[in-house]
Image (cartoon, rainbow, N blue to C red):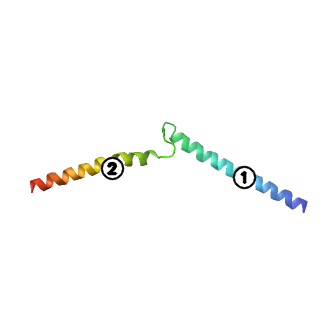
Amino acid sequence: MQQEISSLEQRLKVVEQISVNQRRQQIDQTSKYLRWWPFPGLQPRAALVFLLWPVLVAWLFRYAANKRRRT
């Protein structure tokens, strides 16, 4: 019984270590790509879309208005 508990504790330690290592790798990858980014909760792509969609919509409206005037 004691041997089984020891074996279980060893396996649990291994699983915990693997989990910690995977989390560190995720953090390292994220921080490597986003070190310069001042908003940690907002992805750069999302910010780009958020900032550019009004410009795109305004351009589409202007294009449609010009096309309507020509016809």
**Disc 2 and disc 1: Cα gap in Å?**
44 Å
Q: Nearer the viewer, residue 30 or 49?
A: 49
Q: Position of residue 54 (x, y in %)?
A: 31, 48
* Extreme residue in the bottom direction: 1
Q: Position of residue 63 (x, y in %)?
A: 19, 51
Q: Position of residue 15 (x, y in %)?
A: 72, 55
Q: Residue 22, relative to residue 1: is it above or below?
A: above
Please tell me which residue is depicted at 33% across the width and 50% down the height of the picture.
Answer: 53
Q: Nearer the viewer, residue 10 or 51?
A: 51
Local crowd size for mark 1, using a 10 Å CA cut-off: few (<14), some (14–19), many (≥20) = few
Local crowd size for mark 2, using a 10 Å CA cut-off: few (<14), some (14–19), many (≥20) = few
Q: Which residue is mark 2?
A: 53
Residue 25 circle label: none
Please tell me which residue is depicted at 81% across the width and 59% down the height of the picture.
Answer: 8
- Circles 2 and 1: CB distance less than 8 Å? no
Q: Nearer the viewer, residue 6 or 62?
A: 62
Q: Nearer the viewer, mark 2 or mark 1?
A: 2
Count all numbered tags in the image, as a single digit. Answer: 2
**Of callouts 2 and 1, which one flags the residue occurring earlier in the amino acid sequence?**
1
Q: Position of residue 56 (x, y in %)?
A: 29, 49
Residue 16 circle label: 1
Give the residue type at disc 2: Trp
Quarter of the image with the N terminus in it: bottom right
**SS assignment at label 2:** helix
* Extreme residue in the right direction: 2
Quarter of the image with the C terminus in it: bottom left
Give the residue type at disc 1: Glu
**SS assignment at label 1:** helix
* Extreme residue in the left direction: 71
Please tell me which residue is depicted at 85% across the width and 56% down the height of the picture.
Answer: 6
Query: With 26 as the anchor, is 57 left or right in this view?
Result: left
